[in-house]
Image (cartoon, grey):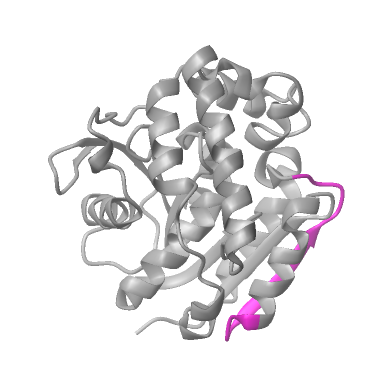
Amino acid sequence: MDVRAGDGLRLHAEAHGEGPGEVVLLSPGYCQTHENFRGQVAPLSAAGHRVVLWDYRGHGLSEAPGDPERYSIERVVEDMGRVLDAAAPGRTAVLGGLSFGGLASLRFALSHPERVRALLLLASGPGFKKPEAQARWAAQVERIGQRLEERGAGFLVEGRSAATSVGRRPELPAARAAGRAIAAQSGAALAAFGRRITGPVPGLIDELPRVAAPALVLVGSEDEAYLRAGEVMAARLPDARHVVIPGAGHVVNIEEAAAFDAAVLDFLAALPASG
C-alpha cells in the first residue's frame, strides 16, 4: 500500500495477516529496506499477528525528497504513525526495529506511549550520551554518505559492508533478496537521510526509564558493536527481557532466523492481555 506522509510524501508499506494477535510494525536499519524483514512475515502471521513492513523516506520503495529540510527524526516518527494509521487503524502496535529502527521505535514510544503495546529492540542502542562519541558517529555517517554519493548503494552489500546490511551469510536467499533491494536505492537519498537524521539524532539513554512498554532487547552474541548497548537498555528499561542469540552478528533476523523468530514469538505470547 502507499501511505501519504504529513508533508505529502509517498511511503511504501505492506500489511500481512489478519489474525487476533498483535500488530507488529518492523522498521529496518539505516540503508536497509522492508525486504530485510521479509523472512519474518510468514512465521509471525502464521501465529496470528498482523505484520507491517515499511520503508523510511529516501529508502526502498518510498519516495525520496530532494529538499534536505524534509529529512528529520520528527518526520520519521510522524511517518511511523501514518503507516500505523493506514495498516491497523485504531489499534496499538508492537514496534520492532533493527539498529536505527530500534532507536526510531523508542522515540515513537516516548512520543506516543498510548499507541505502543511493546517494543522489539533488535541489535540496537539508545544513542550516545557523550558528545565525543556522538561526533565520532556523525563523522562515520558522513564518510558513508560520501561513498554513497560517489558509488551508489551497491557497495553496501559488498565485502565487509555486507555484514551490517544483509548479514554474514550472504548466500542465504533472504540475504540475497535484501541485498538486491538495498543496492537498488538512491545513494544520494540515503546520504541525505544519514546527514540529517542518522548521524545527528540525539541519544535517549536518560529517557529509557520513562518507557513503560514491555521490551525485548535482542542482540547477536557476535555483534560486538551492540552487545554493551543491549545490556544498557535492558538494565535501564523498566520492563525488559534480554536475549542474546548465539553465533549471530548484527543482522540477527537473517543470520539466525529460526532462533530470532522463536525468541520474538515467545515474547509476544507472554505479553499480558490488553485492555
Q: Quadrant of residue 231?
A: bottom right
- Is 196 part of what is drawn in magenta? no
Percent of width and height locating residue 54: 38, 41
Please state the extent of the stretch shown in magenta in the rendering: 236-249
Toward the viewer: 68 or 158? Answer: 68
Q: Is residue 60 visible?
A: no
Q: Residue furthest top?
A: 151
Percent of width and height locating residue 192: 38, 33
- How many numbered marks, from 0 up? 0
Percent of width and height locating residue 50: 40, 53
Q: Measuring 47% from the left and 47% from the top, which residue is drawn there? A: 198
Toward the viewer: 162 or 265? Answer: 162
Percent of width and height locating residue 142: 53, 36
Q: Measuring 70% from the left and 52% from the top, which residue is drawn there? A: 260
Toward the viewer: 124 or 255? Answer: 124
Q: Measuring 40% from the left and 23% from the top, which residue is drawn there? A: 188
- Is 240 part of what is drawn in magenta? yes
Q: In the displayed structure, would residue 138 be above or below residue 215? A: above
Q: Is residue 2 left or right of residue 48?
A: left
